[in-house]
Image (cartoon, grey):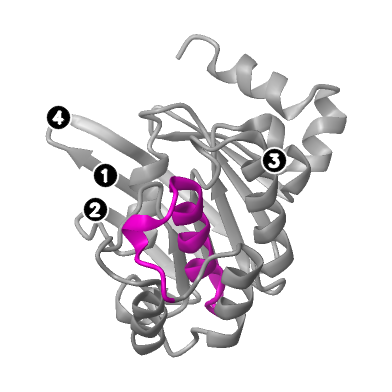
Amino acid sequence: MIDIENLNKDYGKISALKNINLSLEDSRVVGLLGPNGSGKTTLIKILTGMISHYSGTVLIDGNKIGPKTKSIVSYLPDQLYYEKWMKVLDLRNSFANLFDDFLIDKFDNLVEKFQIRRDEYIYKLSKGNQEKLQLALALSRNAKVFIFDEPIGGVDPALRVLILDTIMENRNSNSLTIISTHQIFDVEKLFDEVIFLKEGKIVLHKNTEELLIESNKSLLDLFIEVFRYV
């Protein structure tokens, strides 16, 4: 589903990504793990088409990054991105117009589950409900690739559980799902495979079950070991 060859991205004299080679299949949940500054967000922004200047080859479902890939990738950024003067219903209709794969009934069911009124102004929602609204938008697309950037960062433990359960219950099981997070303990059991990104390089990419058996350690312990001096 995703094929990357010799990907490099520099910001002036700073190398954010260094010779990334990566192949990811569909029907998998992949953990993209690493400390701040490791290159995770840069990689995600390239996959979502937000960064277009880089060297190397990046393909999603056989297509170069562009309008076609944007139509099959659903992205949940790590910050709220919508206008708060809008109503929930406005966002719903906007997404329905923007994306042919947006499932209105699924969105309605999710916001009902989250106890969010469709006629409510976004600025009146609590931070937690704004997070859940953004999650509902991302999950209501019938996409081939889902990318979640820190979906449980800065939220309380109860909301973390709700968000992760909702992702796993509502994602397209045939899709590729990438989750970038620092909350290793909460997500270890979700990942089919993990990628450790350190200083712009992939230092580990492996099947999670095999990795845990071989190392006889938890994913959190491995993360601490690899990034101890970062």
Q: Residue sitting at 40 percent across and 53 percent down? A: 77
Mark positioned earlier in the residue sequence (3 or 1): 1
Please state which of the two labelled residues, at mark 4 or mark 3, is closer to the viewer: 3
**Could you tell whether 190 is left or right of 95 in the image?**
right
Residue 70 coordinates in the image, percent (x, y): 37, 74
Instruction: Tell me how far mark 4 sits from mark 1, CA to CA.
Output: 10 Å
**Measured along the vertical axis of the image, is residue 217 above or below residue 183?**
above
Instruction: Specify start and end residues of the magenta stretch as a single range.
Output: 119-145
Query: What residue is shown with label 4?
Result: 13
Query: What residue is shown with label 3?
Result: 187
| Residue type for callout 2 | Tyr
**Secondary element at image label 2:** loop
| Residue type for callout 4 | Lys
**Measured along the vertical axis of the image, is residue 222 above or below residue 136?**
above
Query: What residue is shown with label 2?
Result: 54
Circles 2 and 1: CB distance less than 8 Å? yes
| Residue type for callout 3 | Val
Residue 122 coordinates in the image, percent (x, y): 36, 62
Q: Residue sitting at 87 percent across and 31 percent down? A: 213
Instruction: Tell me how far mark 2 sits from mark 1, CA to CA.
Output: 5 Å
**Measured along the vertical axis of the image, is residue 225 above or below residue 73?**
above
Is 141 a magenta residue?
A: yes
Task: Say which quadrant the N terminus sits in.
Answer: bottom right
